[in-house]
Structure formats: structure tokens, C-alpha cells
Image (tube, rainbow, N blue to C red):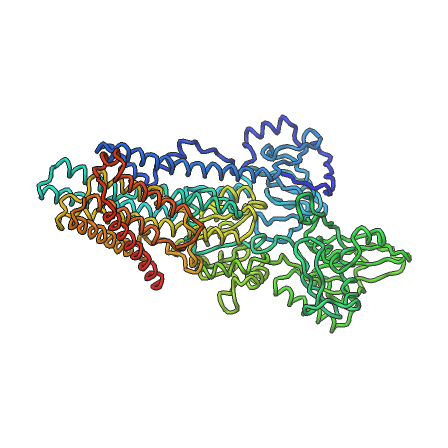
Amino acid sequence: MTSRTADAPAVRAPDRPGLTQAEAERRLVRHGRNEVSPPRPTPLYSRVLAQLRDPLIMVLLGAALLTIAIGDHPDAVVIGLVIVFNTTVGVAQEVRAERAVAALSALSAPHARVLRDGAAHEVAAALVVPGDTLLLGEGDIVAADADLTEATALLLDESMLTGESEPVEKAAGETVSAGTVVVRGRATATTTATGPASALGRIAALLDGDREPTPLQRRLASLGRVLAVVTIALCVLFFALGLLRGLPLSIMAVTAISLAVAAVPESLPAVVTLALALGAHRMAARGALVRRLPAVETLGSVSVLATDKTGTLTEGRMVVQHLWTPSGAADVSGSGYAPRGELTRTGHPLTPEELRPLRELLTTAALCNDASLKPPQAGSDTWAAVGDPMEAALLAAAAKAGCPGPAELHRACPRIAEAPFDSLRKRMTTLHHLPDGNVLVCLKGAPEAVLTPTVLAEPSERLDRAREQAASLAAEGFRVLAVAGIERIQWHLPAAAAEQGLHLLGLIAISDPPKAAAAATLAACRDAGITSVLITGDHPATAHAIAARTGLVQDGKSGEVVTGPELAAAPDTDLTAVRVFARTDPQQKLDIVHAWRAHGAVTAMTGDGVNDGPALRQADIGVAMGARGTEVARQAADLVLTDDELSTVVTAVEEGRRVYDNIRRFLVYAMAGGAAEILVMLLGPLLGLPLPLRAGQILWINLLTHGLTGMAMGAEPVAPEAMRRPPRPPDQHILAAGVWQRLLVLAAAVTAVSLLAALAARAMDLPWQSVLFLALLAAQLGVALGLRARLLTRANLFLPASVAVSAALATAALHVPALRSLLDTEPVGWTGVWLASAAALAAFAAARLLRAAFRRKA
């Protein structure tokens, strides 16, 4: 694969001809395409069947059969429409998400440069085969596992595979892996493994396995079983009592079946789907693309957020943050590679005299440098690094200090010789011709390779002070460079020979700094009761420094860093007791997720690399980065962040809690109404009301209360306290935490006020059955308004509007001749309307008082 920039050097083709095209085609047939996770389109019928296997849809299908059995075709049509709506929305959301992910995937450039028939060709990465000669240059993504045959100053970014933020130097004879990126130099390599046989493919193989049901799906399945048992038992009881009272068998059978239909909240799947779809829509507008609709609610249950470091908590770009010279230190502001920022000391700007040694330090680092900065392209304000990210950070810092630009420096001081950086010397030296004919020696490298008497002509006290400062900065997670230089007269020896007798100019501390919003995001997670865990392939000191700077760990509290090798040596380690993991491999990330899930947690895992894919798949919620994430990560995830911001996860969690709260609010409302209808039918005869309601009246009440009004509850805004309470336990029943108590109290209240209205109407010689019908419906609508978290909000005007429409249709049932004939009702007069209105107000007051009581208890 390639994404070569215009500044990348040309890749020299080796003398050998490489494979012939015919041989490459034969190997492609034998080894298969170079694809690790080819997307397989899911047939439409499979998507539909997956939606219909939802437990509550199964209950709803049973209710539809019952309505057909009793000849209630209008209700059967309504229930059928609910099933079709639920299935259509669910399938449409999945298809829409997959298309959006495919569009993100198209942002990558899946091509590679190979040598075939003696000439360089650009081919699709999927067509690379074992034995192909790869030509690699700056910006290229390595298309397959390969052995390096030639390498010149080659530096690879392996973070997508290892999580290590710093590039790795590679030499001829070493191996490179598919998915890594060339940040500097050029090379040729012979392909050794492609597709599933590559390192990337072996990691992708860990993604196999079916997804487990989400917490919401498990809770609704449990609810479906409870509803089925309770509804059948109560309706059989009602049927038996009616027969004992001598009522006709046919009437009791129809009424019992009608009660069964009424007791099942048939609009629950529609409410759930609408709430999830609205949540997914709101999340997409805020940068979070949901790939599976049930994942919206699962986010609200998240209790552990396992995050990677590079590009998630950090900016993903190297930045100079601190400078030290023997005459003083300074802090450097600014982010990314943009040459914007300033140098300060204890928060105050520096004087020209204080700036002089710092500018000398950064000018030398800019000369001893092979990188360049790429200005923002059209439609973007982001500067990019061309070459080694660390060297690009030095150029940005030099610009912030007011040093001349790279082009001006190289014109004034052209390079005449160099000793490149290598892993043995751990330093780089360049020689530059000065206008007066002298030679300027510029050196930078690791402190341990520079701060020695063999390189520097400095007093031992100054060297000791510099070493202490370097150790202190390294302990804080910085990558530290020591810079030295000297002006020599008429130097003609090799550059490496000039690495002695130099003067120490200072130290430069570089890091991939935390994002500005990272600390606030993790603080919001703590407020919401979510435990944050850092899992990275980076150095332990760097991992701990980022964890401390973002507030993920505090002094003395879970501050220990555990590395991958330590986990391998001690497999019995309690993974849930650690908050920072470093040097981890993909299998260990998977083990950490499994450990938390076994501990009863609902896990969200963020990542962007191939190495994150298995853990993203196995977590309850996998969160991938959309802009810079790999295809493997995006395909494994449930949620793709199009803005690559961790704060979007907190937004998504809030939406998940909103959805779950709305579903539970609807359950309280709908099941309390259904229970009240059953209680009215059971208790009415004991109070002298022989057959309180007819079958058609029960179904009309059910249609109006569970229809528009019920669905409108799925769009309610988030409760003010939603992100200040802990996440609910994953094994908690959907009716737990006070739901069933509120349900029973409200059912009793609605039953009482409805029966009181009917008894009062009978005493006043009014058509008591019609008054009971109107009062029972009005009381349920009063509960719908009383349960609102934000009573007078304008965020969901659909709910009060739907209540008004339902009330109008209830009144129409008493006055429209066709409805009166169908439902066997009659007008109740203003007195009957006042009785029903009093029932609605009493039920509304009961819902408000109950909500206040449970909020105080919580």
C-alpha cells in the first residue's frame, strides 16, 4: 500500500528483474489475494431474520396471532406495522453504517510498488504475492511481510501493529511487517507472507467468533419471558373467574385474549428501535458512527473504558515541550507540527539575552536534520511532517523560537558531510560550510551517547548536571535529545571524526503530548462512574507520564505500570487491579478485556491499529478511530469516531444512558397501564361492575396509549443527572432498581382513580362503562406526562402533542357514530369528562410524587 507524498525520494529499483507477471499470477492463484479481512456483504434476508429473532418481536408475533384468532384485524395490522417498522429501521441503520465505514476505508490508498519483469509497477496491494520485490519510500505503507534486501536510513512507524509511538530503525537483513509505514529513507524488500499468513493477518484472525448479545438484548429477552408467564397466568385467572360468575364462554374468551394483547406492550420494540435510531442519528451528528443499532444502548452501560495512548489520549504528533541549556530552561507552547507557539520561562516571555542560547540550540538541531514541514493543504489547517516526526518537531520548535527557516539555514550553511544516525552510535552529525570558510559541526543524539568526555569538552560538573536533567525529563516520559556543536577551521576529515571536543548546547525534551480535552474527558468518565484503563505498546515511563498528566492515575493510587513481559512472566496477575499497561501485545489486550468482562464489567475499548482489532471485537463496545484508524480496527468496532476524539465517547455514553432511561420510562408507563387494565377487569366485578370493559374498548385504550404517545417517550431528552450516576450492573434486570416498585404503585393508582370515576358515574346515573373507558385512558396519559425527567422542556414537543391527539381520539370514540358502534360506547357529558380529567390529574400527581421520592432515595 502506498500514500507517498510529493516530497518522498524516488525508490531505486534493484538490478535483479523481480518476478515475471506470469509467475505473479500463478502465485496469486496458489496463495490467494493479499487480504486479511475481506468484507463479506450480508444478505438482506439474514439481516431481516436477525431482527425478527429479537425476543420481544417474538412476543409481538404471538400477540399478532392472538388478535387474528379473535378477529381483531385492525389491531393485527397495527402490530404488524410495528414489526415492519422495527425491522426496517434496524436493517437500514446497519446498511447505512456499513456504507459509511466503506467510505472511510476508501480514504486509504491500497497500492504497492513492485518490481516485475525488470520494471517498477504500481499494483493493488491485494495482488502482491510471496516473492514479490517491494520498492519502499517515505510515506509508503508496507503491503506484506517482507525481508529487507537493501535499506538506506530506513525508519518505520510500527504503531499500528505494536502501539509504540516512536519510529523504529531498520537495516538490511531485518524483517518488516504489513501495515507499517515508512517515515524516512528507502528500501527494497522480498515479500515472505501475505494475507492471513502475514503478521497483520494473524492478528485479524483473532477477530473470528460470534458477537455476544448486548446488555439490552439480554434484559429484553428476560423481560419477554416474564411478560409471557405473568400475562398468561392473569388472563387464565380472569377467564376462570368470569366462567364462575356465569358469564358466556365466548365473551370471556374474547375478553381474556384482548387483555393478553393489552398486557403486552406491543409498541416496546418500536419505542426501543426509535430511541436507538434517534440516538444513533444524534451521535452521528456529533462524530460517532454507530455500526450496530443495539450498541447505542450498550454505551450507557459501560463501566470500564480501556483506551490506547497514541492519537487517542495524545495528539499522535511529536512536539518539543521543554528546552534546557547550561544557562537556563524554557517551556515551548503550541501543538502539532504547526510553527506556532512561544518560548516561556515560569510562564513569562523570554528576553533577547535569554533567547540567544535557546536559539543556538534549536538552530543546531534544525541543521542536523533531514525532515521538513508540509504546510496545510486546501481545506485543512494541519501541518504535516515529512520524514522523521521527531526531527519535524525540532523544526517546528526552531520556528517558534524565531530561528531562520530550514531553506534559509541550508542556503547560508550548506551541508558538506554527515554521519547518519544508527542504533550503535545513537547520534547524528552534520558538517556545514560557513560564509567565512570555517566548518560548523552539528551533533544530536541520545544523552548517554553525547554526554560523555569523549564527545564533549565540558567540565565534569556540567556533564553531571546535564545527565541529571536528562534523567529527570526521561522519568517524566519525554524522549530527550542532547545537542552539541563547535566551529572548526578548515576541517577535511569525515564527519564521524568531528565527534569530539564539542560544546554542549543543551537538551531538548520531546513527547507526544496529551490532547487538550483528554484530562476533562477522563474526569467526566470518573464522574459517570466509569473506570479508565490505559493499554499501550509504548514505553512504561511514557505510559505512566501520560496517565499522570491526564489524571488517569493519581499519586499513590493505582499508579503502577505493568508491562507485557511482566504479564507473561506472571500469568496469575489480577488484571482488573492495574490501570496502566505498557509494552502489551494483541493477545494481552484481549486478556485484559476478558478479565474485566469476567469481573462483571461492561467494557468499551478504543483503538486505531491492527493490534487493537481483536480487543475491539471482544469488548462489549469496540470504538475505532475513523480518520487515522486501520481497516481492521474499523471493521472490528461497533462505534467509529469520525473526529478521532475520545470526548466523543463520553457523548456517546450520555446518549446510551438517555436511550436506556427512555426505554425504562416507557416500560413503567406501558406496563403500569397494562397492569391497571387487568386489575380493573379483576376488581370491577367485586365492586358491582359486572364486565368493566369490552374487548374493543381495551384494545382501543391500548392502541392510543401504546401508539404515538408511547413512541414519543423514546425521544425524551437526557435527564440532568444522567452523567453523575454510576453505570448500572450488566446483570441487572430491566425492571430492577425501583422500576417494578414504581410500576406497581402507578398501576394501583391508575386502577384506583379509574374505578373511583366509574363508581361515581354509576352513582350519578351516568354511563359508567364509558366513563371508566375514558378515565382509564386519561389516567394513563397523565402518567406519561408525569414521568418526564424535564417536565416543561421544549426538547420533545412530540410527547405533549401525541398526548393531545390520543385524548382527542378517546373523545372521538364517544361521539363518532362509527367508533361508538365499533366500541359500544356512548357520550358521558361534561360531568363524565370532569371525572376522567380528575383521574388524569390524580395519576399525573402520583407519577410526579413517585419520581421525586425515588430521586431522593437514589
- Residue 499 lies, with reference to residue 700, above or below; the image says below
The percent position of residue 403, horizontal first and vertical second, equals 78, 58
Classify residue 50 by image quadrant: top left
Measured as percent of width and height from the top left, residue 699 is found at: 25, 39
Whether residue 228 appears in this view of the structure is yes
Q: Residue at x 56, y 44 (%)?
A: 630
The reply to whether residue 55 is visible in this rendering is no
Q: Quadrant of the N terminus?
A: top right
The one nearer the camera, 608 or 519, is 519
In what quadrant of the picture does the C terminus appear? Answer: bottom left
- Whether residue 487 sits left or right of residue 61 in the image: it is right
Tell me residue 243's x, y (percent): 10, 41
Name the residue located 75 percent from the left edge and 53 percent from the top edge.
369
Write down the quadrant of residue 427 in the picture. Answer: bottom right
Q: Name, please, the residue furthest toward the front.
A: 830
Q: 492 or 234: nearer the eye? A: 234
Identify which residue is drawn at 31% across, 59% down: 850
Count how many numbered circles sit on residues in the image: 0
Corner quadrant of residue 325: bottom right
Relative to residue 106, is residue 775 depicted above or below?
below
Image check: 234 left or right of 512? Answer: left
- 513 displayed left or right of 724: right
| Residue at the bottom extreme of this rendering | 461
Question: For this rendering, which residue is in front, 351 or 692?
Answer: 692
Q: Is 102 situated left or right of 658 in this image?
A: right
Q: Position of residue 810 (x, y in %)?
A: 29, 42
250 vs 721: above or below: above
For this orientation, the residue located farthest to the top is 22
